[in-house]
Amino acid sequence: MGRLIELSFGFPTVIFTGMLLLSFGYWILAVVAGNLDLEMETDIDGEIDLDGAGVGTSLLSTFDLHHIPFTVMFTLLSLFGWAISAGFTSFVVTAGASAALLIGTFIALGSFVASVFVTGRVSRALQPFFATPPHVKRRDLIGKICIVQTGRVDRGFGQAEVVDAERSTHLVQVRCEIENELSAGRKALIVDVDDEGIFMISPDVDAIT
């Protein structure tokens, strides 16, 4: 037991131990708060949303890490990284090799690369266990309440989250033609959508909420 603790909190395995503790903390809070949601956020066409999120989502797709929710992927990445790092560190110490910073750095990098590869294979295998929502048409969201995600919404800028009939969450581009006080966290009513998938919203939701 003492050896396990020494490995867990020694360099380089401590990096993955920290990631694991962060993951476990999230799952505990999610269960306690009753807000455990493993559904992946999707776009309006029912595909995994990899648009507009920058380099991060592109890398997830490149390394096959986008098949499962990010929280599950991060937990698996942490777990595999910890196991690989602890195993290699134990082997190096047992073999009498120096536990120098340089060796530890190589082990950390190698463990991370290996864990990315293993997590990618596992996430592909786990993909069928996570429900993929059916095809959702843009016009199906007209008449629904959305939650603004940006600091303002005007004729040329704005984003909001909306939940469809299948309880899937969509991050959509929204616009408002009238003066308003919409800001992050405020509710609005989706009233129309154009051919480019940009939704028109109204800040007047008092009559229906």
Image (spheres, grey):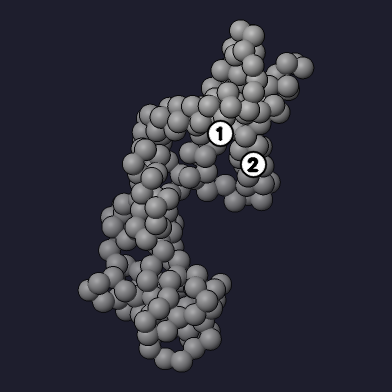
**Quadrant of the rendered structure where residue 42 is?**
bottom left
Mark 1 = which residue? 78
Q: Nearer the viewer, residue 189 or 82?
A: 82
The residue that appears at 45% across and 80% down in the rendered structure is: 153
Quadrant containing the N terminus is top right
Query: Of the residues shown, which amino acid type is indicated by label 1?
Result: Ser
The location of residue 114, given as percent across then percent down, is 45, 27
Circles 1, 2 touching at the beta carbon (< 8 Å): yes
Mark 2 = which residue? 22
The residue positioned farthest toward the bottom in the image shown: 179
The residue that appears at 58% across and 27% down in the rendered structure is: 102
In this view of the protein, can residue 165 be seen by the observer?
no
- Residue 126 against residue 88 in the figure, above or below: below
The location of residue 116, given as percent across then percent down, is 44, 33
Work out whether mark 1 precedes mark 2 in sequence or the reverse, and give the earlier one: 2
Left or right placement of residue 155 versus residue 104 in this view:
left
Query: Of the residues shown, which amino acid type is indicated by label 2?
Result: Leu
The residue positioned farthest toward the left in the image shown: 195
**Regarding mark 1 in the picture, which secondary structure is present there?**
helix
